[in-house]
Amino acid sequence: MSKMINALRMRIKDSRFSLHRNQPPFAFHGGLKLDTTKRALAKGIVELPVPPTLVLPLISYAKQPLSPLIVKGETVQRGQLLAEGIVAPTSGVVRSIEKHETIHPGALSIDSIVLDSDGLDSRLVEPNKLSSDERLEELIAAFTTDNVANAGDQKSVLATLHQFALAGLGGAGFPTAEKLMAAKQGLHTLIINAAECEPEIACDEALMQSASDCISKGIDAIVKLTQCESCVLAIEDSKPSAIACMELSLQNIDSSVQLMIIPTRYPAGAESPLIQSVTGRIIAPREKPVQHGIMCINVATAHAFWQALNYQPLDSRVISLGGRAMPNPCNVRARFGTPISFVLENTDNDSLANKSRVRAGGPLSGFDLRSTAVPVTARTNCILVEPSSPETPAQACIRCGYCADVCPAKLLPQQLHWYTIAAELKKCEQLNLDACIECGCCDVVCPASIKLTETFRYAKSQIGYVNTEQQKAIDAEQRFAARERRVEKRELAKAVAIEKRKLSIKANKQPDSTQFNAALERVRSRRGAKKP
Amino acid sequence: MSIFVLLMALFAMLILMGTVLARLSRPAGTTEQSNETMMIEKVNALLPQTQCAQCGYPGCRPYATAIIKEHALTNRCPPGGDKTIADLSQLLGTPVLALDTDCGDEKPALVAVIDESVCIGCTLCIHACPVDAIVGASKLMHTVISNECTGCELCLPPCPVDCIDLSAPAITASQWQWPRPV
């Protein structure tokens, strides 16, 4: 093994490239060379016990509330679908559906399913189990049928994929079912993202070292399903042992997958820099990779896809524990819904110094947490504990332009910073602020310690807020106008009816005398009959 | 020389005819009218569309129309507050006035909430709501679609059991905003 790794090291050395190359891996704009020591890697993957209580936030990728498919008090089995994209991570009883704090920069409370574990961890019993190959074949057959003729098949594919409960495990948590359905447009390159470029995060690397066979099978299954023309597994050259493991196991699958070793440079693992590295194509702002026939899937998601084919829907993930103040850095596999405090306690990391802060996400792209009672989700790739040193106060911008040099999205952070301060959000939009991937490179190089990423996050959310408020105003006006029309119509109909009635009364003023007399006669005769 | 004069005369005649034709081809006053409609649209776009009628007009568009046609003052919109007044003044080139407090005070955005345990299902609030943000039926529970409520308060007076309150809207994940960095 070590010999092989050494040979690989040599190859990696050769693969180091100058900035301008005309063959892959291509260079992308900006980025930074950061420290790549990943302390979490030392101990493999620690399997975490199931916590007594799990919390599953009912929220979709698009930040919309999800409706639960179960009720309070119901007993659920592991793997049972609880809402769209959420399965029960263990068996137990639904204690309640209530607001609970989530991993969120503002510690936002969101309606969540609170599940009490029964300690049995029993899986949902599938009545007629298929083998993974049979299941995949079924899925492929339904996936490749004609759209219009077989709407039912389409629904069944989506339903099966929803049962897998897959979400992108790279950190963004995009629903994989939707991504795979978009692949129907035709793919020429499927990129399996194993770059994992951010310091401290080593969950994918640990997974590749320990479960490379399952990953390869998962990649094979996705290649077969999407029928892409080529598939590339992109790994940074700082991970020789993971490369060796993957190279070995990729030989055992049917599909041909190209292993591409890309130079270590943050943020090589972000979607658009990665696509640029692998294919040389630049995805313009507001464009989607699938429009170019390209799709990126995280390596851990490929692993999860294989597990899901074997009736183990996604209900846990590997999390890297790191940071300068983490006593015991390691990689753990935790069920979704496990409180972060539970993760820290069960890895001997609870003896935190008083003045330390816990972060979710990597050291550059993450954010500080206000509470550790929040549950792990598919997006939690890393938990950091950092000493809370006093922040360097921001100084005035000296217009050095380093931020523009390192920006992988080729933005002008300096300009965007000025416009945000001046509340010129329209101009921020014109400068493609929404293409900012919040990687934090500009923060690292800023000599004036300006918190640029925070500024852009604020500006982006402001733009979103202003746009939704404007849309709401337009909608309100439309409803008001519709109501005016309705009221007017009703009033008009009323007036017409009154007028009609008046006319008919006028026309019938002289009642028909014969009818009148006949009626009078009837009454009289009845009265006469009653009298004795 | 004479040719030059002739050409000039021809040119002048053509221009004259063109102007006359252009004038004849549309009825007089259309330009002013379309200008006015355009201005009303622009003013309307700056108003908050709460349809609260605090300005004394039955809705935002009627107020916009009054501003343009009747030169109504621009300081009669409490929900829009100082920002709307400033925006309107900039658009119309009028001086920035202070908010007319006879119309109401500027308040943070609120939404109506019906206490469903008290509601008797009289439908009066449904008829009062200018933006159709209340759902319900006679003798059945009513509820406010909080995302569509503009906080105009017009449902408060007709309620016979006083079960409608205004409260700050709950912040959802899609509405949450990053704090402004210091």
Image (cartoon, coloured by chain):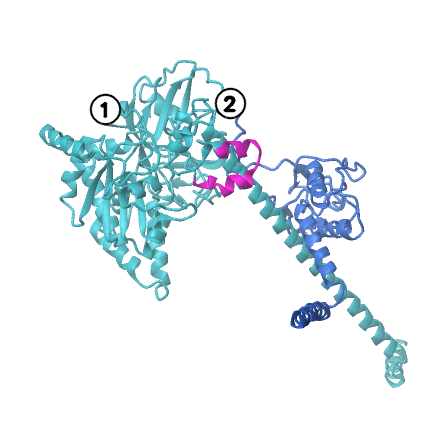
Chain colours: A cyan, B blue
What residue is shown with label 1? A43
Label 2 is found on which chain of the structure? Answer: A
Can the viewer see residue B163 in this picture? no
What residue is shown with label 2? A396
Q: Is residue A235 above or below residue A515?
A: above
Q: Residue A410 magenta-drawn?
A: no
* x then y, percent, for residue A50: 33, 30
Label 1 is found on which chain of the structure? Answer: A
Q: Main secondary structure of the magenta part?
A: helix
Which one is earlier in the sequence, the residue at label 1 or at label 2?
1
What span is colored magenta in the figure?
A415-435
Q: Is residue A254 above or below residue B82?
A: below
Q: Nearer the viewer, residue A475 or B67?
A: B67
* x then y, percent, for residue A5: 13, 30
* x then y, percent, for residue A106: 50, 30
Residue at 57% of width from left, 33% of height from top? A422
